[in-house]
Image (cartoon, rainbow, N blue to C red):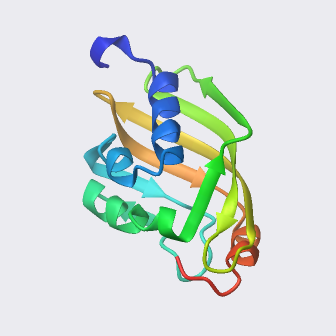
Amino acid sequence: MPNHITAVELLRRSLDTFLAKDMKGWSELCDDNVVAEFPFAPEGSPRRLEGRKALYEYLRNYPDVIDVRSIPNLRIYATDDANVAIAEWSASGKVLANGNAYEMSYATFVTFKDGLMINYREYWNPQAFMQAMSGAQF
């Protein structure tokens, strides 16, 4: 990895960029051929996205839908693979269209190559997501 930036530091940077609502900047932390997986995504939401462009298109309007105001819990773990980091984290905010609270916990597994994300896999509760959204579209 360039300048010996660890996977833990790179994952923390990606979450800081997400919290800053900089979806373009977040997508630029990804390799052109990144694969993003959301295995627990609810029906109608993508479970797999391939490529930086597709991931950016999926995320670019996220701040207009969900106003994430803080990441109250964050633990990032190094693994025995220097290119992989795991985060347990939560997001706190509100859904703008309906005013509902948005409180979500995540488990995120990220693989990096040359300082960029090449695989991003995120687990979250689809029932809590659907309840928070209740009629709002993402």
Q: Does 108 sit above or below residue 58?
A: above
Q: Is residue 83 visible?
A: yes
Residue 130, picture quadrant: bottom right
Q: Does 52 sit above or below residue 11?
A: below
Q: Is residue 112 left or right of residue 2?
A: right
Q: Nearer the viewer, residue 118 or 27?
A: 27
Q: Nearer the viewer, residue 136 or 10?
A: 136
Outermost residue, left side: 32
Residue 104, picture quadrant: bottom right
User: What residue lies at 30% left-to-right and 12% top-to-bottom?
Assistant: 3
User: What residue lies at 52% left-to-right and 40% top-to-bottom?
Assistant: 15
Q: Is residue 47 visible?
A: no
Q: Does 6 sit above or below residue 131?
A: above
Place of residue 69 in the rendered image (x, y in percent of width and height, measured from the top left): 64, 50
Place of residue 118 in the rendered image (x, y in percent of width and height, measured from the top left): 35, 42
Q: Does 54 sit above or below residue 91?
A: below
User: What residue lies at 66% left-to-right and 87% top-to-bottom?
Assistant: 135
In this rendering, the count of numbered labels is: 0
Place of residue 100 in the rendered image (x, y in percent of width and height, measured from the top left): 74, 72
Place of residue 129 in the rendered image (x, y in percent of width and height, measured from the top left): 69, 70
Q: Is residue 76 left or right of residue 2?
A: right
Locate the N terminus by quadrant.
top left
Q: Is residue 29 left or right of residue 80?
A: left
Residue 136, picture quadrant: bottom right
Outermost residue, top side: 4
Q: Nearer the viewer, residue 81 or 54?
A: 54
User: What residue lies at 76% left-to-right and 76% top-to-bottom?
Assistant: 131
